[in-house]
Structure formats: C-alpha cells, structure tokens
Image (spheres, grey):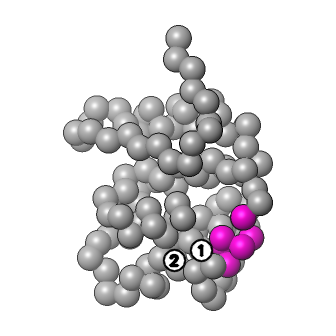
C-alpha cells in the first residue's frame, strides 16, 4: 500500500514518454483533490504554451489566467499583472497538477 502525505510544496513525476506519468498524476489528483479547498488539473502545458515564446510575460499571464479561470470555475477572467492570481489564492490550500511541462518558465508562472 502506498501512503502519500501532502506536506510538501512541489512534487515531480518524470521519465520517458509513454510510461504512465500522466495516468499516475490523474489518479493522484482524483484521489486527493477533495482534501483541498481548490484544485485544478492543467494538461498539455507544453502543447498549449510552447517554448520558445516571443513574449515571456504575456505567456506567463496567459498561463495564470487559465489556471485562475479553471480553479475558480469562471470563464472570461481578465488579469492585468502576474500578482493577481497569487493575491487571490494566497490563503487557500490548493492542489495544482501541471501535466506535460517542458520548461522552467511554465512552472515559474504557475507554481510560484
């Protein structure tokens, strides 16, 4: 039996393509998301926000806008700067799963 405690800030699952990383992440999300005030599973980050990008700030803003929209289940959210999501979510216990991340900038935009 595997026991997982969420006392950490970040966890990574990495390995070769096709070995079930996304499947494991989805299973863990399904098992533990109810223990958090807010939760979101964002998939295909690499395909939706490819690197290199022309404007890093705008890409980070798009990533945070999408995360905030999904996590509070509200469409057409407009955020004007990168600290908006952080300010709105700062006191919440959250589970955020980012699937298929391939660049540190994507993590920086969403995990910090």
**Residue 28 in the figure: left or right of residue 39:** left
Q: Which residue is mark 2?
A: 62
Vertical placement of 49 versus 7: above or below? Answer: below
Image location of residue 81, percent across then percent down: 60, 86
Image: magenta residue range: 84-90
Please give the name of the residue rendered at 63% of the width and 88% of the height, measured from the top-left corner.
Answer: 80
Main secondary structure along the magenta-highlighted residues: helix
Please give the name of the residue rendered at 45% of the width and 67% of the height, measured from the top-left corner.
Answer: 108
Q: Which residue is mark 1?
A: 65
Extreme top residue here? 1
Q: Quadrant of residue 87?
A: bottom right
**Residue 11 in the figure: left or right of residue 79:** left
User: How many other residues sit within 10 Å of disc 2, few (<14), some (14-19) or many (≥20)?
Assistant: some
Is residue 55 among the parts visible in the rendering?
Answer: yes
Q: Which mark is residue 104?
A: none
Q: Are marks 2 and 1 in contact (CB under 8 Å)?
A: yes
Image location of residue 59, percent across then percent down: 44, 79
Image location of residue 42, percent across then percent down: 52, 55
């Amino acid at each position: 039996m595997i026991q997982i405690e969420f006392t950490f800030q970040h966890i990574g699952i990495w390995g070769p393509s096709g070995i079930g990383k996304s499947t494991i992440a989805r299973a863990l999300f399904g098992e533990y998301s109810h223990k958090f005030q807010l939760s979101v599973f964002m998939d295909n980050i690499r395909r939706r926000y490819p690197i290199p990008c022309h404007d890093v700030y705008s890409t980070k803003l798009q990533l945070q806008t999408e995360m905030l929209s999904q996590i509070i289940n509200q469409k057409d959210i407009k955020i004007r700067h990168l600290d908006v999501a952080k300010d709105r979510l700062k006191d919440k216990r959250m589970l955020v799963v980012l699937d298929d991340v391939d660049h540190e900038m994507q993590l920086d935009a969403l995990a910090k």
